[in-house]
Image: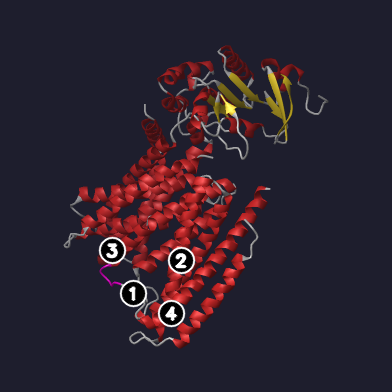
Amino acid sequence: MSHLAAALRKDLLLQWRARAQVVAVFAFGAAALLLFSFAVGPETTVLREQAAGFLWLGLLLSSTLTLAESFHAETEHRALEGLLLLPASARALYYAKALANALALFALGAGLVPVMVILYDAATPRIPALLGIILLGSAGLSAPGTLYAAMTSQARARQTLLPLLLFPLVVPVLLAAVKATSLVIHGDPMGQLRAWTLLLVCFNVIHWSLCGLLFDRVVED
Amino acid sequence: MVTGRNGSGKSTLLRVLATAARADRGTAQVAGHDIRDARAEVRRRVALLGHDSGLYDGLTARQNLEVAASFLGPAAAARVGALMGEFGLADRAGDPVSAFSAGMRKRLALARTLLKDAEVVLLDEPYGELDPPGFRLLDKALDALKARGATVLLATHLLEHGRQGCDEALVLEEGRLAWSGPARDLREPGAAP
Amino acid sequence: MRDSRLPYGLLALGLALLLWGSYWGLFLAPRETYMGDVQRIMYVHVPTAWNAMLALTFAFACALISLFRDDPVWDARLEGALEVGVVLSALLCMQGAIWAKPTWGVWWDWDPRLTTTAVMVFAFGGILALREFVDDPVKRATWSAVAAIIAYVDVPIVYFSVKWWNSLHQTQSSPETVSRAFQWPLRINAFGMLFLMSGLIALRARLAFLRREEEVA
């Protein structure tokens, strides 16, 4: 079995066995969406207009929980170090973990869509396009997020450090994903969707390669 | 065997030799390869059991071994069942590690360490947390390692165990080598050499 | 790191140039036709912008070298460059707000360059925070270098995304250099700030290096 396949199997196994947590994170995300509507007020037009922003803010906040948790199991008993000493390729371990996290965030985002539809009256028939954007956005959050989660899981004040480091970095993902989602929900008369999708793709390409290259230095002594 | 007071550097030594930690100065050759220049080569031939078990609490005992084996190759995968039997874990193979006692975890960690067909095996306080049956299982495993020609470096406080099974002894004091020689000549710390 | 007096010399020279350039720009240079006296902030704003970017680019270079060389000197320089870069970027945002209020009536108008700068303050400031919470100096050096590289590579992406995001609103909205009468005080201030910044980075790096020596000892 290649190292990537072995690592992916490991991460999917870990996620499967921790599936109760997914429900908790989903509840957190849904609660966030609810709180946003309380903060903004019950005017349906305003809520529908800003629905995309709320969805992605909710997903961004929830992602810190998912990402931080993904390394808890690895550092608790130095399991990750144990794998590195086998030797397992650090790069393979990174890509597997980042892929698993991207998948988890995608599931979370997709799960929050019905919440968005109900709370903000923001439905759309273009489901594949919406899911595609959620996938790209989740991947964009996961690539740097997994690297920083690995870093902060070994530092003090890890709860505050991860969002502090990650949020400024993923501003392009937030902007592009919100804009693209908004266009999918409300219509795209000027054909801007392609540009925003391209931005998401570029961000992903750059960060998946860069973070994969640098992960080795983050986890090795 | 390596022994010495708490904080004398036994764990650090083992970790550096296994390339789990980096030395600030100097170098070493383990299993014929340099720990700085040929880290991957050293890792292929060395197995380390440190203070931490390296286990995933969320996975079952069998899954923990299978995960490690999946990186090592089909030969290791074939050994999973045998190792679990050897360390008395067979009837708890499907239980999550989070439910294990400290002694059971230690056994599982030992089994995991021995999955790799290593030339050099580094064990940091392997007798800790084991019960008397566990001691016997470990001694059997160590005898088997010796029989197939592996080098075993054991860091321990339990001098008696060390003196029985080991050929050489090293005593560390504050990070420096204070004494080395045949294990049977080793005396209690504090006594004149 | 040698205990040279060069940084102090740079500080003195920089301050002197800044005083000269600012006096010239504030009192002697002609009043701009359309924007009036408010435009004078450009004599500080533009040099700050250039030097902030320069400081963070130097930080990026230090990060790369630090990763390849494992030399604590470059990690110390990284810390100095990061801190000075973050301070200059924060100043830039404040200057932008001071200029925007009388010009546009709002403190913040989402100008792409200033917004990107604000994101950079958080991104690079976050790395300084990271350094505070990592005890092992080797790990601290490696991790901040990695984080600095990722943050720096991200800067153009952030800029473009904010630019497109804001494109429906307005284009350039920060003070611009207009004619040659304005060039000299600008250049003097730019160099003044450059020397000041270099002196500060050198001194801050020295401090970081000494602290690390003390830690390791």
Per the image, the residue denoted by label 4 is C184
Q: Which residues are magenta?
A: C167-171
In this view, B30 is above or below A80: above
| Quadrant of image for the N terminus of chain A | top left
Per the image, the residue denoted by label 1 is C173
Q: Residue furthest left?
A: A189
Q: Earlier in the sequence, mark 3 or mark 1?
A: 3
Between the C-alphas of marks 4 and 3, the distance is: 34 Å
Label 4, secondary structure: give it: helix
Q: Are marks 1 and 2 in contact (CB under 8 Å)?
A: no
Please state which amino acid type lies under the numbered disc 2. Ala
Please state which amino acid type lies under the numbered disc 1. Ser
Please state which amino acid type lies under the numbered disc 3. Trp
The reply to the same-chain question for discs 3 and 2 is yes
Please state which amino acid type lies under the numbered disc 4. Trp
Of the pair A15 and C138, the residue shown nearer to us: C138
Between the C-alphas of marks 3 and 1, the distance is: 15 Å
